[in-house]
Image (cartoon, rainbow, N blue to C red):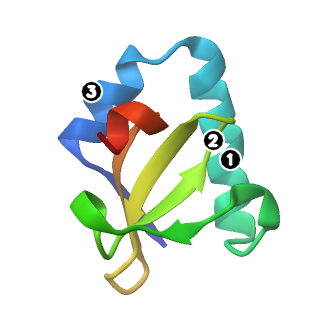
Amino acid sequence: MEVYYSSQFKKQYRALSQKIRNQFNKRSILFFKNQIDPQLHIHKLRGKYQGLYSINITGDVRTVFDNSYKNTILFVAIGTHSILYS
């Protein structure tokens, strides 16, 4: 599986605390091992991110990804719930 990161995601990721970055890294490992793991709370999005999916990184931090391309994941955005969905 190929993994890509949008420029928006990269910018948002760099602005996160080291603790949140570490949590994203742990969750992404879990995601690549088992995309249906209930800890990830993966769900389809509506509105601004319609057709994309979200993974819970912490209680309030989410990452948005696109899996519409075969064998490819594109991480689109990462941030708090209020920042991403407002």
Give the labeled residue for mark 2: 57
Within 10 Å of the Cα at label 1, are there few (<14), some (14-19), or many (20+) other Cα atoms?
some
Q: Which residue is mark 3?
A: 11
Q: Which SS class for mark 1?
A: helix
Foreground tag (1 vs 2): 2
Q: CA distance from mark 2 to mark 3?
A: 17 Å
Q: Amino acid at mark 3?
A: Lys
Residue 74 to residue 79: above or below: below
Which secondary structure, mark 2? loop
Secondary-structure class at tag 3: helix
Residue 78 percent across, percent down from the top left: 41, 39
Name the image quarter holding residue 67: bottom left
Between 30 and 53, the residue placed more toward the observer is 53
Q: Amino acid at mark 2?
A: Ile
Determine the residue positioned at 70% across, 58% down.
40
Residue 27 circle label: 1
Q: Could you say which is closer to the camera, residue 42 or residue 25?
A: 42
Q: Is residue 29 above or below residue 38?
A: above
Residues at circles 3 and 1 in contact by the CB criterion of under 8 Å = no
The residue that appears at 29% across and 39% down in the rendered structure is: 86
Q: Is residue 29 above or below residue 16?
A: below
Q: CA distance from mark 1 to mark 2?
A: 6 Å
Q: Which residue does the image show at 47% across and 47% down from the upper left? A: 63
Q: Are marks 2 and 3 in contact (CB under 8 Å)?
A: no
Q: Position of residue 6 (x, y in %)?
A: 24, 47
Disc 2 crowd rating (10 Å Cα; few below 14, some 14-19, many 20+) is many
Q: Which residue is outermost to the bottom?
A: 70
Amino acid type, residue under disc 1 in the picture = Arg
Within-10-Å neighbours for mark 3: few <14, some 14–19, many 20+? few
- Residue 57 shown left or right of residue 54 in the figure: right
Pointer 1 with pointer 2, Cβ within 8 A: yes
Residue 38 in the figure: left or right of residue 76 = right
